[in-house]
Amino acid sequence: MLDSGTLMTITTESAAVAAGLTSAAVVATTPEAAGPYELERDIESPNRNLTPISSALDAKGRLQVGGCDLADLAQRYGTPLYVLDEATLRATCRAYRQALEAHYPGPSLAIYASKANSSLAISALVASEGLGLDAVSSGELLTALEGGMPAERIVLHGNNKSREELTLAIGAGVTVVLDNWHDLALLDELAPAAPVSLMLRLTPGIECHTHEYIQTGHLDSKFGFDPDQLETVLRELTRHPWAQLTGLHAHIGSQIFELQPHRDLAGVLADALALARSLGHPVRDLNVGGGLGIRYVASDDPPSIQEWVRGVAEAVHQACQQRGLALPRLLCEPGRSLVASAGLTLYRIGSRKEVPGIRTYLSVDGGMSDNPRPITYQSQYTAVLVEQPRAGASERVTLAGKHCESGDILLKDLALPPAQSGDVLAVFATGAYNASMASNYNRIPKPAAVLVHEGAADLVQRREQPEELLRYDLLPERLAPVT
Ligand SMILES: Cc1ncc(COP(=O)(O)O)c(C=O)c1O
């Protein structure tokens, strides 16, 4: 385990340059570490850091990311603001690709699980790095296609796909993940003229230690075919001329720090592969899903991307060898570990409430609508004041959101230097499952998002305006205000 005073894997300048960083971003250390902001980062595996890999301090000790001053960004674009670091995102994509090439002797493809954060900019960036993409709705699919992701690198997931979603997927030529019998019935009804590339999702029956809501692979799961249905569905598929089974898939959960469940999954999938091929299905792809965890707080110590890929690749290779199977193409579907550590959210502090002897609340201008993870999963985060990220703490505060909900607490027991109304705070590692899970609770508009790189900031999602929240409301004439 690391703690905030422990230095992580030492970064190398060559790795930094490869990730598009200037060597100045590989900052030197000072021995007297203060505050949760870490000076050294693992550039090869960004999921192991609290902050984006391009994070740096300017001469006055203020925090920059992607060469942009965070206080300036807050001033220019307003708060809350999602900030995404391009260098981190690209470095992570490359880490997955390179690790797959290094550790798996067959072909491979990393597929970005876009539920983690879906936008045109991220789709375009991930496509430009040669990755594929997993979508679970028409919205995510359209975003991927419009962002330039080639259809042959996209898979459509979902445990209750609609006719419209399936029609869009078939028309675009993306691979459809067959999750259940209902999918098969709908596809049959749509009677595709051309073959449809299918990937069959299994429930692998593997438990892992993560939050109950984000376990998907154990047997009591809404996703995928149960193992005892596998042979029946494989036989059934041989009777549908349009069905071209090209892959098998399983996903065991999210924010996982253990490697063994992923190794165990390789055996389950290899057994399924042997069965599918023995029944004549030309299965080429084995998709092991996502799930690698990231570092949200100093005590989190996830495996590196390289360790995870190596563990999975070796297990799949070995499982196939043991069964005498020709090596499939190895697919994985990272979401969180690909994008979370590239992101942070800027908030401005507003009110303060002191409850003597109990706690001090500092309220910010966002909360559960832009980050529902704390109230949903009791997730923890790390935060600093952007103008003094290294200052020693003088008090412990509870960071409250602005929503009309007592549970709208972003962070408990945050150690901060003296903080005042108007100060800007950065909450780290919010790149995954924040923007994509955002809501308009209390009719609060969704934040803007900027992509930062080498001193430039590009707006990639503009801030929603309160008036826009009314655009789908209709007022029946009989209720119209009398003028
Ligand atoms: C089918 C599937 N693939 C991939 C992922 C991505 O998982 P993670 O973000 O943990 O990498 C998920 C997320 O739950 C998923 O359901």
Image (cartoon, helix red, strand yellow):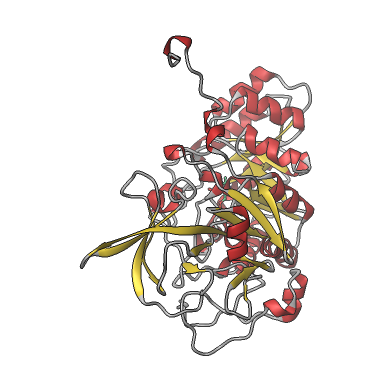
Residue 92 placement: quadrant: bottom right
Between 204 and 475, the one nearer to me in the picture: 475
Quadrant containing the C terminus is: top left
Horizontally, is 5 left or right of 280 in the view?
left
* In the foreground, 379 or 223: 379
Taking 132 as reference, is 249 left or right?
left
Vertical placement of 413 versus 26: above or below?
Answer: above
* Picture quadrant of residue 454: bottom right
Point 42% across, 69% down: residue: 419
Viewer-proximal residue, 299 or 383?
Answer: 383
Residue 143, picture quadrant: top right
Q: Position of residue 115 (x, y in %)?
A: 58, 45
Vertical order, 418 against 368 (above or below): below
Q: Position of residue 314 (x, y in %)?
A: 64, 64
Q: Position of residue 399 (x, y in %)?
A: 38, 60
Residue 169 spot, x, y in % from top left: 70, 31
Residue 212 visible (yes or no): no
Q: Residue at the spot x=70%, y=44% of the render?
A: 120
* Residue drawn at point x = 59 percent, y = 25 percent: 162
